[in-house]
Image (cartoon, rainbow, N blue to C red):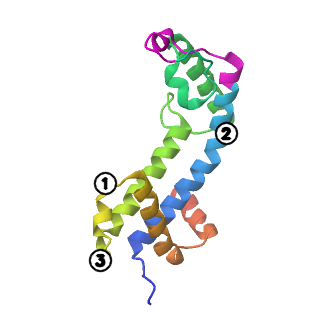
Amino acid sequence: MAQYQANEEQIRLSEALLVAMANEDVIRPIVEGYETAILEKHRFKIDPKWTDIGVEDHVILHRKETFLLSDADAKVFFEECFAARDEAGLAVDRPDSCPLLAAENLRISAENALIKSLACIPGLEPFATGILSLNTRAKVLKLALELFLPSCSDAKTILQRYREMCP
């Protein structure tokens, strides 16, 4: 059986996804590290408005629960996160941006573009709509990368190309 030959767009989209994934992998532990340290330092409790509707009162120690912070605690949390972000030297487009959310968004955009590039492959057109369950999306991305990665450049070449694009 012949191996599928990726077109130039599919190769570049695959490489862009690899770079976005690597970027997220580098940024995630830094951001989660300072967020966790800030939450542990302050040991914020959830806003009473949440306990009033039945959410069990507890200390917020995980980033995914920061939506439960009171406005005053959220202000402290985000001010300290922005200071830690700047101290870590993480670049952002706006002063109120989280570098991890930006990296996740970049990865998701790269995934979406790669999935759409499947439209030209007979039998895979339905997946290119992007309307997929998370499980199916993961499988389609895995398939796309398995199809296209053999045609991609090596890591050194990809990184060099990105360095030249972003001086």
User: Is residue 42 one of those drawn in magenta?
Assistant: yes
Q: Earlier in the sequence, mark 2 or mark 1?
A: 2
Where on the picture, by quarter, is residue 163? bottom right
> x, y (%) of residue 93?
48, 37
Q: Which mark is residue 30?
A: 2
Q: Quadrant of the C terminus?
A: bottom right
Q: Which residue is mark 1?
A: 131
Q: Inspect this view and state whether residue 167 appears.
A: no
* Tag in front: 2 or 1: 1
Chain part drawn in magenta: 38-55
Label 2's element?
Answer: helix
Give the amino acid type for the residue marked by disc 2 in the picture. Answer: Ile
Q: Quadrant of residue 140?
A: bottom left
**Marks 2, 3: nearer the viewer:** 3
Mark 2: few, some, or many residues within 10 Å (few <14, many ≥20)? some
Q: Amino acid at mark 3?
A: Pro
Badge 3 or badge 1: first in the primary sequence = 3
Q: Which residue is mark 3?
A: 122
Task: State the image coordinates of residue 42 (x, y, percent, origin top left).
Answer: 67, 16
Mark pair 3, 1: CA separation: 18 Å
Alpha-carbon distance for marks 2 and 3?
42 Å
Can residue 82 be spotted in the picture?
yes
Is residue 128 depicted above or below 96 in this figure?
below
Residue 118 falls within the magenta-colored stretch: no
Q: Secondary structure at mark 1?
A: loop
Q: Is residue 141 above or below residue 133?
A: below
